[in-house]
Structure formats: C-alpha cells, structure tokens
Image: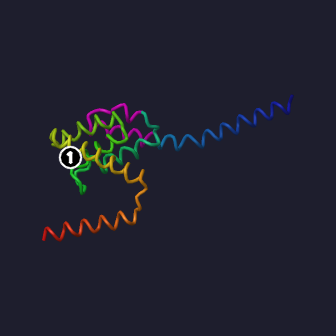
Amino acid sequence: MLKSKLNVRSLVIAAGIGALFTISPARAEDASAAAAYKDIEATLGSVPDMFKTLPDVAIAGAWAEIKGVQLNPNTALDGKTKELMGLAVAAQIPCQYCIYFHTEAARLNGASDEEIKETIAMAAIVRHWSTILNGSQVDLATFKKQTDDVFAAVKAKSQ
C-alpha cells in the first residue's frame, strides 16, 4: 500500500513538473495569437470565423502569410491579378468558400464581370489540356521542345 501511494505521488509530481514546462510556450503562443487577432481586426474590421478554426500556434503564421502576400500592395502582382489567380485555383480545387471570397475580392480590386468570366474560362482550358496531356502521357521533353519552337516562331513573326 505504501509503495502504491509513493508511485501515485511520484506520478502526480512528474505530471505537475511536466505541466509547468508546457505553460511557458502556451503563454507565448497565446500572446502571439492575441497579437495576430488584434491585427486581423484592425486590418479587416473584424476577425472572421475562418481564422478561429486554427489553433493558437498557427494563427500568427497564417495571418503573416496572408498579409505578406495576398494583402500586400508592394508585391510584383497587383491585388486584382492575385485575386483572379486565387479564383482560377479555387474553381479547380473546387472550393465554394474560396470561389466566393476570391470573386468578391477580385471585384473589390477592380475586376470586371468579363475579367472574372475570362479567368474561369482560362482555368477550365488549363484543366482540360492538363487532363488530355497527362492522360495521354505525352512525352514532356517533346512537349517542351515543340512549345519552344512555337514560341520562337511567334516571336519571329512579331519582329
């Protein structure tokens, strides 16, 4: 009985010490998450539920990725182009959430209905030919050579 109590006591002490070691990182993650949520609200006016689906350890990184590329006006691509690309990918995944979001974001960035339609048509064309090329197992080296030849001929005609 005494040995059993000692084992239980040792287990409780070990668990308590283990819990102490996990508290510090959790507080740092909580602070990082709190800062990210604060910045999301400042940037977007609220914190959409999609961000709340992430664990605290992931929210700061996820927000940094979105803010650093998608929302960043100082990138090589303008906002409209990035959102039209997002729509093209979303249509192929397919993701109804992403389709809705990127369509509205593209409009907010100045995309016309015609540009949105053309984006979806291009996504469909790429998907169509990808299916044909991959399904037919077209030789990649031959495809690249023929593509290079086509572009060289087009370039020569334009000069």
| Observer-nearest of 91 and 107 | 91
Is 20 included in the stretch rendered in magenta? no
Q: Quadrant of the N terminus?
A: top right
Q: How many marks?
A: 1
Judge from the rendering whether residue 127 lies leftward or rightward of residue 116; answer left or right: right
Check disc 1 and give the amino acid type.
Lys
Describe the element under mark 1 as helix, strand or loop.
helix
* 51 with respect to 28 (left or right): left
Q: Which residue is mark 1?
A: 80
In the displayed structure, does residue 149 sit left or right of residue 139? Answer: left
Segment colored magenta: 30-52
| Observer-nearest of 96 and 17 | 96
> Which residue is located at x 20 percent, y 40 percent?
117
Furthest residue in direction left, as rendered: 159
Quadrant for the C terminus in the image: bottom left
| Quarter of image, res 105 | top left
Residue 41, located in which quarter of the rendered image? Answer: top left
Dominant secondary structure (helix, strand or loop) of the stretch shown in magenta: helix
Residue shown at 37% from the left, 65% from the top: 142
